[in-house]
Image (spheres, rainbow, N blue to C red):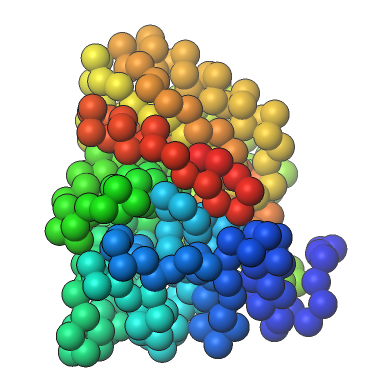
Amino acid sequence: MKKFVNDPRQFVPEMLTGIQLASGGALDYDPRYNLIYRADAPNDNKVSIIQGSGSGHEPAHTMIVGKGMLDGACPGDVFAGPPVEFVYETSKLLYSPKGILHLVNNYTGDRTAWEMAKEMCEADGMKVGALLVDDDVAVKDSTWTVGRRGVAGNFFVIKATGAASENGAELEELVRIGEKVIASVRSMGIALTSCTPPERGTPLFEIGDDEMEVGIGIHGEPGRERVKLASADEIVDILLDAVVPDLPYSSGDEVALMVNGLGGTPISEQYLLYGIAHRKLADQGISVFRSYVGEYCTSLDMAGASLTLLKVDDELKELLLAPAEVSNRIF
């Protein structure tokens, strides 16, 4: 598998260096902790929000650090959660008098690191809130989790809490808003190919040219089933039939609709899937308040896509529409 890479062990540091240099001074980088953070953080007038999972899911999380989003991200190596030290030291560096909020995707390694770091921070007298994201409806328990996985719905947790933090909301209010989003967001993905971690150099799993993995995890974890490749209409039906009944979403609901590319899917195909999903939701009486099409949480170079729905009310609409700007990208 051909990749742009030097020493695979330096893949993450070199990527993070590039992110910082491309920011035009908006971001700083601390290589000791794989830390990308806002150059103006911490801000005494706002709660700091941080996250860090495995690398390989970009733009999550290092590329969504900025105004109205994350204040910092401290990822681990590719598909590996950050060490406790990264989380603890990041929390100390970015701590604000208003407190700090930890966003954690539901993976065993992530939870262990963030829970231990939270205890250490609190022992130091820091005020810490935590949110656990688990939006993937594909499977209840997976290779790396107890309970549901946290996938692309994580973006909406960041967007809502980031907007509220920018407006000066207190830590307890951010936790309430985050829990509201988590309760209202659901996702599922389908993979057409595997992905290739740089250090491995070969695909993570084998899948036939005529097959697709339904409910794939963003680290290549097995989903619900492996079936023969279907048409785009049938694929959207599979995703909606899993996501819509889970909350459930009902006729009259308004939603944010996200079609997320997993790293190797052309944007044209993502918009094709989006158009089908938009039409099929309208047929069920579910209207789309805001659209999100592109790569938000990937799995390196995996060809595939996930679909996320967030049920919105007036409060969440306002937060989603609040200005945010990160790494030269506006959400």
List x then y, in percent, for residue 250: 23, 21
Residue in the foreground of this view, choosing between 280 and 212? 280
Residue in the foreground of this view, choosing between 213 and 306? 306
Residue in the foreground of this view, choosing between 126 and 251? 126
- Residue 185 seen in this snapshot: yes
Q: Is residue 322 left or right of residue 33?
A: left
Query: What residue lies at 43% left-to-right and 59% top-to-bottom?
Result: 70
List x then y, in percent, for residue 204: 63, 65
Q: Is residue 198 left or right of residue 49?
A: right
Query: What residue lies at 62% left-to-right and 32% top-to-bottom?
Result: 270
Q: Is residue 205 left or right of residue 50?
A: right
Q: Is residue 302 above or below residue 120?
A: above
Q: Quadrant of the N terminus?
A: bottom right
List x then y, in percent, for residue 154: 39, 51
Query: What residue lies at 39% left-to-right and 12% top-to-bottom?
Result: 282
- Residue 306 seen in this snapshot: no
Res. 206 image quadrant: bottom right
Query: What residue lies at 51% left-to-right and 83% top-to-bottom?
Result: 33
List x then y, in percent, for residue 164: 29, 48
Total marks in image: 0
Res. 202 image quadrant: bottom right
Res. 42 image quadrant: bottom left
